[in-house]
Image (cartoon, helix red, strand yellow):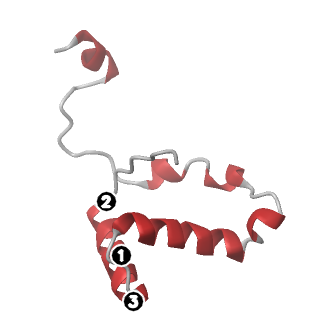
């Protein structure tokens, strides 16, 4: 099975804990798999192609880091 690393906001983590309690999950990975499976089933599951194009830009809706380690992308690659 492939591994996916996921960085989440505190709000998402809180929602995930709420989902885990409601569904009786003890492991985050199992809860996330179930949530994704439920979302796919609502859209027709594997029987219909999923329009992942609707996901484009969702990451840009999250707030930016208020205290970034680097002033810009160039500084990141320069190692400053």
Report which quarter residue 67 is drawn in: top left
Q: Is 60 displayed left or right of 36 in the figure?
A: left
Residue at the image position 47 percent from the left and 47 percent from the top:
60
- Give the mark toward the camera: 2 or 3: 3
Question: Which of the numbered marks, if any, corresponds to residue 9?
Answer: 2
Q: Which residue is mark 1?
A: 15
Dot 1 falls on a residue whose secondary structure is helix
Residue at the image position 43 percent from the left and 86 percent from the top:
23
Q: Position of residue 24 (x, y in %)?
A: 38, 86
Tell me how far mark 2 sits from mark 3, CA to CA: 20 Å
> With respect to residue 25, does 3 lie above or below?
above
Residue at the image position 33 percent from the left and 86 percent from the top:
21
- As rendered, which of 35 and 60 lies closer to the eye? 35
Q: Residues within 10 Å of mark 1 (few under 14, many from 20)?
A: few
Q: Is 70 displayed left or right of 53 in the figure?
A: left
Tell me how far mark 2 sits from mark 1, CA to CA: 10 Å
> With respect to residue 35, does 1 lie above or below?
above
Name the outermost residue toward the right: 48
Tell me how far mark 3 sits from mark 1, CA to CA: 10 Å
Report which quarter residue 20 is drawn in: bottom left
> With respect to residue 32, does 71 lie above or below?
above
Name the outermost residue toward the top: 78
- Give the mark toward the camera: 3 or 1: 3
Q: Which residue is mark 3?
A: 22
Q: Position of residue 49 (x, y in %)?
A: 81, 57
Residue at the image position 40 percent from the left and 81 percent from the top:
19
Q: Position of residue 8 (x, y in %)?
A: 34, 56
């Amino acid at each position: 099975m492939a591994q996916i690393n996921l960085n989440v906001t505190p709000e998402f983590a809180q929602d995930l804990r709420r989902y885990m309690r409601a569904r009786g999950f003890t492991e985050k990975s199992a809860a996330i798999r179930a949530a994704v499976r439920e979302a796919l089933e609502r859209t027709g599951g594997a029987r219909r192609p999923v329009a992942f194009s609707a996901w484009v830009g969702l990451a840009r809706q999250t707030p930016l880091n208020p205290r970034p380690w680097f002033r810009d992308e160039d500084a990141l690659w320069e190692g400053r």
